[in-house]
Amino acid sequence: MTSTGRFTLPSEENFAEKTKELAELWGADAIRNSDGTHLDEAVLALGKKIYNAYFPTRAHNEWITLHMDETPQVYLLTDRILAESDTVDIPLMESFFAEQLKPNRDADPHKYWEVVDRTTGEVVDSANWTLDADEDTVHVSGVAAWHEYTVSFLAYIIWDPVEMYNHLTNDWGDKEHEIPFDIYHPATRKFVFDTFEQWLKDSPQTDVVRFTTFFYQFTLLFDEKRREKVVDWFGCACTVSPRALDDFEAKYGYRLRPEDFVDGGAYNSAWRVPRKAQRDWIDFLSGFVRENVKQLADMSHAAGKEAMMFLGDQWIGTEPYKDGFDELGLDAVVGSIGDGTTTRMIADIPGVKYTEGRFLPYFFPDTFYEGNDPSIEGLDNWRKARRAILRSPISRMGYGGYLSLAAKFPKFVDTVTHIANEFRDIHDRTGGVAAEGELNVAILNSWGKMRSWMAFTVAHALPNKQTYSYYGILESLSGMRVNVRFISFDDVLAHGIDSDIDVIINGGPVDTAFTGGDVWTNPKLVETVRAWVRGGGAFVGVGEPSSAPRFQTGRFFQLADVIGVDEERYQTLSVDKYFPPVVPDHFITADVPVDPAAREAWEQAGYRIPLSGCGGGQSIKPLGGIDFGEPVLNTYPVNENVTLLRADGGQVQLATNDYGKGRGVYISGLPYSAANARLLERVLFYASHNEDKYAAWSSSNPECEVAHFPEQGLYCVINNTDQTQKTTVTLADGTTEDFDLPDSGIAWREA
């Protein structure tokens, strides 16, 4: 039986009858338009709450074509060009998409551009180069032969990146390119607010203004072959203008260089240890953006409408986890649900009345084509989100794209009916309350609270090759029976460690925002963490935790004494490293399957197989089902009192170390899987000396998880797979109950 409410349905032109049918089937109480679509009068007359997507800075080419110097701008870095004599020519647009980007020849290049000798890092005197505007080439003289040179230049963004993506994905052919515009310019800003004021008057049937989004696109640049070139969901590259740069200088007392944006080609990736210029620009930008967001929200309210922000597209500068977001007057935030991590990214946002998730798949032809089964992705997306929703509920759900495409797939239609009913059932049973968390876990990195649930990400819910070993930490935690917060090194240095924190996790590769880089050379940070663990705290390091970029005081991991593991950086090769035997049975690895034949061979070897040369290690793999991701090479125990739980190939993958009254744990990497989530859960309970709390509300099968709602006197068990699963749940009093769950199943019981 279909329940109703908490569901937003996308619709489009000439699809009223089917919209009505699917709205009833899926229990929709709200209808919205998607990019490039409009709602018919017959749809508006269905009596549902109406969301209208609103794009403040696009879809008005009649204005911006008359003011093309007021489009958003970005600093671009050319390819590195080798000088073979005392002159060099550097083409600007050779590796960029000319339909998206156009060099800004209006503002003085010698004031706003920069030529850099990349071999030395020195800036070339502006008197030594000229711009050939006809050829979009910079001619540089007086250079050093066999050095590489680049130009960092301002470019106009002349095709809105999101509309461009949709255009290319859906093959919109000769449909007019939508040109974005930048409200930092007073004339355009006035146009934006005047246009919105008129739109509000012309849209009496709109109940919710779904801002998609506000003013500045995250970094999304394409190359000359129409492929993505730079994608950073947190990137502020596409936010500059000569006017803003001059205002920044007046306010902050120093001038930003082009290098502060192109960053040697890294474009200030969120993985980079943030620098003062980067942090100052984010503060400057967010101050401007938020002031104008509040004005749009106030205008919406004055017109009797709600203001909803889409956490995507032009979200840059809003910073929903930065202090003060609750003062903007936004009623709601909606975002794309890619997995558990992105679900929590939306659900945990403070200062709004409700949150909404847009589930996958998006109703676009890249998924909805003959021969494909979109219901597979739909259920997979729901399973990932559901475990997070139980820990931090979103208020509403919905989908996006072309409803006419989805309607052609009956199995998918039935799948959404099931998902929507189950989503509402969870809310009805729990009252929208989060399941109980047993431990308080803090993720420690450079960004802290401002990037809650945003760590280790490159594109939205799309980890790449180098990040999946760490993104799994967040994905595991997103549905785990723990309470999660994000803290920064600045927090710890200024205020110490909160007394209610049970475990701190620091993870990632060396010299990144997530491990901290040079911050670990500050003795106060090391002292604070050591004292806290020594007094009974728990520190979990993943990858290259607490690593200083250069060899410091004989250590690479500055907290090697805490976690019991360090990494050889070719500085102490003459010092022997000895591995103790690997411990075969331990609380942390209790749920890891072990192949009996491997176990027998391992046991016969005395749980160690010495390697030739200095020391020893394990060359067989006794722990099945655990993927430690990309290897962290040359890790070793700092002494033979360290408890090794996995040490294949002469390096450490998993170890624990007693440290005073506390404990440290080292994990080389943690991609997401049910087995790895279970491993991390056991690590957290063990490290914090809470083994005695572990059994209550636990599942014997890692593919199934338990959520306990003490206020409601309920608990549920979920099957996170597309296969049937059996599990035994242990209750708080030590009694057990067996469950036989269908694929994607959920079972509720009184506690």
Image (tube, rainbow, N blue to C red):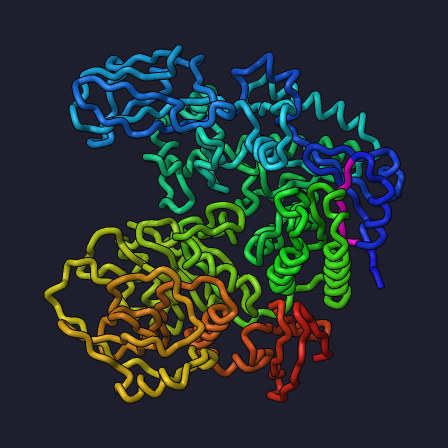
Q: Which of 483 and 36 is in front in this view?
A: 36
Q: Residue 6: within the magenta?
A: yes
- Vertical relation: 480 (above or below) 192: below
Q: Quadrant of the C terminus?
A: bottom right
- Vertical relation: 636 (above or below) 412: below
Residue 273 lies left or right of residue 213; in this view the side is: left
Q: Can residue 658 be seen in this view?
A: no
Q: Nearer the viewer, residue 601 or 58?
A: 601
Q: Can residue 244 be seen in this view?
A: yes
Give coordinates of residue 137: x percent, y percent: 34, 17
- Vertical relation: 535 (above or below) 68: below
Q: Main secondary structure of the magenta part?
A: strand
Q: Could you tell me which residue is drawn at 79 percent across and 46 percent down?
A: 30
Q: Quadrant of the N terminus?
A: bottom right
Quadrant in the rendering for residue 308: top right
Question: How many marks can you see?
Answer: 0
Q: Could you tell me which residue is drawn at 60 percent across and 68 percent down?
A: 721
Q: Could you tell me which residue is drawn at 43 percent across and 24 percent down?
A: 245
Question: Residue farthest to the left?
Answer: 574
Q: Residue 384: within the magenta?
A: no
Q: Which of 717 and 221 is in front in this view?
A: 221
Quadrant in the rendering for residue 314: top right
Q: Could you tell me which residue is drawn at 76 percent across and 48 percent down?
A: 408
Give coordinates of residue 225: x percent, y percent: 46, 31
Give coordinates of residue 351: x percent, y percent: 64, 48
Q: Where are the magenta residues, as a range?
A: 5-12
Residue 123 lies left or right of residue 457; in this view the side is: left
Give coordinates of residue 531: x percent, y percent: 33, 67
